[in-house]
Image (tube, coloured by chain):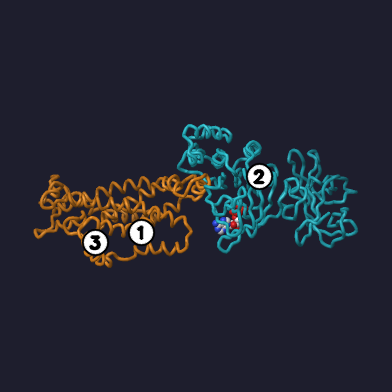
């Protein structure tokens, strides 16, 4: 009796939490397909339209440029960050050099600094360099934010690879770089892919720095959303359409990660 | 083919000294077996030779050349790891062929050699599998095949047969022995199985706590163990070791009174192997005690007597029959060896 009560209580709580968490997302998806007039109604019955998605790419919003900015900034950040982080992670995982623990702590400690605290120095620096409102500035900032995290993440994956396979390869006649290419990278691939997607998501969603550093040319999607708050009021249906476009790529990536997360690559290497 | 020399080699892991001072000379073309209990430093010695661990002090020479600072890849060694060290993301065929690939062999030539070796270790049907789809014994054979697919200067094998079932172990043992005879490549082989050591080795190194206790041929290790540790470790069932004293040419202990040709000693350990004892008439035998256990092994019967605090084991005929707790007599077999040891130092006493 008591057990059953607990069971129902548990379910009820889970459903409640799920509804609270998912409702805003559902609301956003619905609103993206609503006419401006329907936007403020809670009803889920309305005549859907694709006009919002067209409107955001037209004058005066020009969302296309922001999509380009976001895609370029996030992709270039991933392409630079992940290879560098992989090598760093390998070194942290395998080499017993002096001060290794301290160095690794130093890398992680960058993550403890609140972004608001360093956004002004970054702003001043980029102003000096004449890089304000450029994608390059955003890429530099995002590299600084994201790389320590990616190093930490990939290190976890490399730590899980048995050293024996690497040692065997070295005795078999492989150089260190060859070992990394033939043994470590293939085995760490799912982990590196997962880390890349995390890196992409973090950069894609980055808001604070993009808000401060960009004005017109290099504005990214999350910052672009703010434009839909006008003196005529908040344009919810347009903001939602843009929001859907920000969210969908992330959704797809999350699904890819899930598939790779569950696959055990290292099983069977050692007894 | 090459000789290997370890000169005053010390290995420390942080504050822990795994090898206090190792001097070892592996002759060209020999099959040297490192034998010792778990944790005595056998794997460490192998890893030093392979270049997977840095040598703390001392020199390592392979083929006369000092290789302390040489990368593993430049030492031309093939190694079988205790826990396989297979490449989990490669098929069995690619695992075996990897050393050849690193040496730039083409695919077809590689596959031909892989197939030949796979036949030898009975892996022919499994070439397309991943290591995770193999049993422990099969994985071990992949590791073995990967080592023997080419002709290195030196083989290092760390308990390569430990995970095989008893029957396959005997087959593979013979295969290894034959292979060594054929290829003649210097081999350092680690095991904690004294039977494997006895059958394979040209010479055996018995190790204990990071030190070499005895280095000799299997025959001499067996017939003249250097101390109590070796005497106890080699042989199955192990040597009977009896604490007692020698006075007037007779060794005495509870239930035992045995003539020996040695000077008087207040404290001594007498060792005699089960196969050097025979069952004899209880009224005249130098050893008399009740039967504690009888075990038929097939080709013989192991008779264990309880003489005071010590148990004595003897190998009797397969058709020997007696009742438990009956008093039984034992006597040294004519030509059987009696060993004497100092109980304090454990060292063998000259006889
Ligand atoms: N990487 C290591 N760090 C610290 N101690 C180690 C390490 N490797 C081995 N040892 C220690 O060295 C000793 C010898 O180990 P090992 O050579 O593996 O023994 P064996 O192979 O004879 O069983 C053991 O006491 C073991 O705990
Ligand atoms: Mg070992």
As measured in the structure, the alpha-carbon distance from the residue carrying label 1 to the one carrying label 2 is 51 Å
Location of mark 1 (residue): A148
Chain B rendering hue: cyan
Q: Tell me where residue A186 sits by quadrant.
A: top left
Foreground pick, A61 / B321: A61
Q: Position of residue B33 (x, y in %)?
A: 66, 47
Q: Are marks 1 and 3 in contact (CB under 8 Å)?
A: no
Q: Tell me where residue B250 sits by quadrant.
A: bottom right
As measured in the structure, the alpha-carbon distance from the residue carrying label 3 to the one carrying label 2 is 70 Å
**Nearer mark to the viewer, of 3 and 2:** 2
Q: Tell me where residue B54 sits by quadrant.
A: bottom right
> Looking at the image, can residue A7 be seen?
yes
Question: Is B19 left, or right, of B271 in this rendering?
Answer: left
Residue farthest front in this picture: B65
Chain letter of the residue carrying label 1: A
Of all chains in the rendering, the one displayed in orange is A
Q: Are marks 1 and 3 on the same chain?
A: yes
As measured in the structure, the alpha-carbon distance from the residue carrying label 1 to the one carrying label 3 is 18 Å
Q: Position of residue B149 (x, y in %)?
A: 55, 38
Identify the mark at residue B278; answer none if there is no mark: none
Q: Earlier in the sequence, mark 1 or mark 3?
A: 1
Question: Is A208 left, or right, of A113 in this rendering?
Answer: left
Question: Is B78 left, or right, of A181 in this rendering?
Answer: right
Question: Is B79 left, or right, of A5 in this rendering?
Answer: right
Location of mark 2 (residue): B28
* Residue depicted at 27% across the width and 52% down the height: A74
Question: Neighbour class for label 1 at 10 Å: few (<14), some, many (≥20)?
Answer: many
Question: Neighbour class for label 2 at 10 Å: few (<14), some, many (≥20)?
Answer: some
């Amino acid at each position: 009796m008591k057990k059953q009560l607990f069971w129902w209580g548990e379910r009820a709580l889970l459903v409640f939490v799920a509804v609270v968490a998912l409702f805003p997302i559902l609301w956003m998806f619905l609103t993206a397909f609503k006419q401006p007039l329907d936007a403020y109604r809670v009803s889920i019955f309305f005549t859907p339209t694709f006009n919002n998605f067209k409107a955001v790419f037209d004058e005066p919003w020009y969302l296309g440029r922001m999509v380009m900015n976001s895609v370029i900034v996030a992709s270039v950040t991933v392409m630079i960050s992940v290879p560098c982080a992989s090598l760093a992670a390998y070194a942290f995982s395998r080499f017993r050099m002096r001060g290794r623990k301290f160095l690794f702590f130093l890398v992680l400690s960058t993550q403890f600094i609140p972004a608001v605290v360093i956004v002004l120095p970054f702003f001043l620096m980029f102003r000096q360099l004449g890089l304000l409102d450029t994608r390059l500035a955003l890429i530099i900032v995002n590299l600084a934010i994201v790389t320590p995290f990616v190093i930490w993440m990939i290190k976890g994956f490399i730590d899980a690879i048995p050293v024996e396979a690497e040692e065997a390869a070295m005795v078999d006649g492989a150089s260190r770089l060859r070992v990394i290419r033939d043994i470590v990278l293939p085995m760490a691939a799912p982990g590196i892919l997962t880390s890349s997607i995390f890196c992409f998501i973090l950069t894609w969603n980055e808001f604070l720095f993009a808000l401060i550093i960009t004005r017109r040319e290099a504005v990214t999607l999350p910052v672009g959303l703010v434009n839909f708050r006008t003196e005529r009021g908040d344009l919810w249906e347009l903001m939602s359409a843009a929001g859907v476009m920000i969210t969908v790529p992330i959704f797809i990536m999350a699904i890819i990660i899930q598939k790779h997360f569950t696959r055990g690559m290292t099983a069977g290497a050692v007894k | 083919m090459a000789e290997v020399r370890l000169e005053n080699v010390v290995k420390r892991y942080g504050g822990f000294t795994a090898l206090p001072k190792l001097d070892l000379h592996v002759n060209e073309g020999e099959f040297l077996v490192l034998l010792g209990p778990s944790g005595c430093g056998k794997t460490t010695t192998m890893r030093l030779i392979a270049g997977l661990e840095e040598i703390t002090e001392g020199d390592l020479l392979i083929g006369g050349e000092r290789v302390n600072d040489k990368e593993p890849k430049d030492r031309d060694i093939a190694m079988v790891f205790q826990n396989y060290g297979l490449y989990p993301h490669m098929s069995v065929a690619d695992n075996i062929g990897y050393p050849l690939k690193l040496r730039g062999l083409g695919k077809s030539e590689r596959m031909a050699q892989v197939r030949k070796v796979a036949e030898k270790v009975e892996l022919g049907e499994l070439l397309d599998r991943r290591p995770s789809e193999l049993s422990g014994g099969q994985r071990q054979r992949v590791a073995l095949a990967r080592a023997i697919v080419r002709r290195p200067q030196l083989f290092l094998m760390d308990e390569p047969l430990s995970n095989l079932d008893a029957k396959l172990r005997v087959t593979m043992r013979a295969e290894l022995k034959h292979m060594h005879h054929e290829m003649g490549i210097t081999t350092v082989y680690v095991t904690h199985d004294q039977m494997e050591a006895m059958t394979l080795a040209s010479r055996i190194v018995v190790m204990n706590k990071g030190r070499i206790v005895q280095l000799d041929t299997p025959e001499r290790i067996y017939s003249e163990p250097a101390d109590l540790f070796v005497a106890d470790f080699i042989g199955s069932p192990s040597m009977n070791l009896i604490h007692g004293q020698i006075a007037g040419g007779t060794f005495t202990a509870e239930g035992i009174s045995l003539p020996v040709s040695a000077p008087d000693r207040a404290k001594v350990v007498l060792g005699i192997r089960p196969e050097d004892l025979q069952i004899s008439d209880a009224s005249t035998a130098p050893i008399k005690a009740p039967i504690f256990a009888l075990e038929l092994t097939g080709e013989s019967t192991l008779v264990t007597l309880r003489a005071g605090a010590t148990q004595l084991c003897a190998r009797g005929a397969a058709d020997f029959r007696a009742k438990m707790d009956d008093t039984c007599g034992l006597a040294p077999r004519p030509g059987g060896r009696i060993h004497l040891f100092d109980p304090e130092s454990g060292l063998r006493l000259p006889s």
